[in-house]
Image: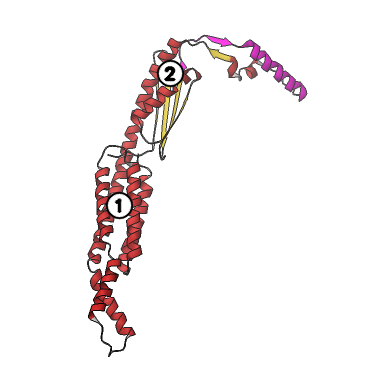
Amino acid sequence: MPRSMTGYAKIQKILEDYKVTCEVKTLNSKGLTIDVSTNYFLNSKELDAISKVKEYISRGKVSVRIWVKFIKPVQVSVDYSLLKTYYEALSDIRESLNIPVPVELSHLLNFRDAFQFDIGTEEVENAWQYAKTVLEEALQEVVMERKIEGEKLTKDLADMVFKMQSVVDNIRERANDIPKMVAQRIKNNTKELLPDDVELNRELFESAVALIADRADIREELVRLDSHLKRTRELLSKDESIGDMLNFISQEMLREFNTILSKSRFTDITNLALEGKYIVSQFKEQIMNIE
């Protein structure tokens, strides 16, 4: 069953010495874009996180936030030289602006680049392994949510395909009578334009009917629409990424209905083709949500 591109999951767990929070949000997008935000000491694992996301999601805008907190005490190194520079700068600002509040330790704590966790490679690897476990769980939850939403979308799309097929079938019924309707229209027009004592040349009349009927022939367009609708039904039954293909097919269906409109000489066929175009536009809007 096709999946929606929208989903959200947030998982928080305490694993050994770490508290891991993972938040995944997915939105509609033409392709696949992945943005990962995490602790600075896990920056080296960003590509690993992106690879993991690609195992679960093939289309959409994906935002991933991974945050790891240490439950156990962690050694912190302080850049006293940098803090001194900040202190002096704040003091100069205070004096220049006549600010009565003195520079305090709480002000200096805001400069996080002066404080670094002393985290070794082994510690980083351990933290990432736990973070990856939570990320996978969040991705699984997002995929499940996208599947549930995808089922609803697929039902709506299947209903639209049924309506389009009904329109095509109705146009075909009328298209079979085009030569007869063309002949009748030409007869009526000639009766209005020519005197009663003028006799029609049967050969010329039949040639005119054949020419106009040929120009109004829409059987090829109907055959292609049948093929597109059949292919769409097949895709809607597949459990894979089909959004791009559905978008392409919908453009082709729109092209066929436009061609029918350009050839149409009769109001009922024109109205049906317009109805078909309207359903295709609704279809195109809905498939923007399909992965």
Q: Which mark is drawn over residue 78?
A: none
- Counting from the top left corner in percent of width and height, residue 245 is at 32, 43
List the single residue furthest toward the bottom: 197
Which quarter of the figure is the N terminus placed in?
top left
Give me the C-alpha separation between circle 2 and circle 1.
47 Å
How many labels sit on residues? Answer: 2
Q: How is the image coloured?
A: secondary structure
Name which quarter of the figure residue 241 lies in. top left
Residue receiving disc 2:
19
- The quarter in which the C terminus is drawn is top left
The amino acid pointed to by label 2 is: Lys
Q: Is residue 118 left or right of residue 258?
A: right
Magenta stretch holds residue 93: yes
* Residue 213 visible in the displayed image: yes
Q: Secondary structure at mark 1?
A: helix
Query: Mark 1 — residue?
Result: 160
Region of the chain picked out in magenta, as a range: 68-97
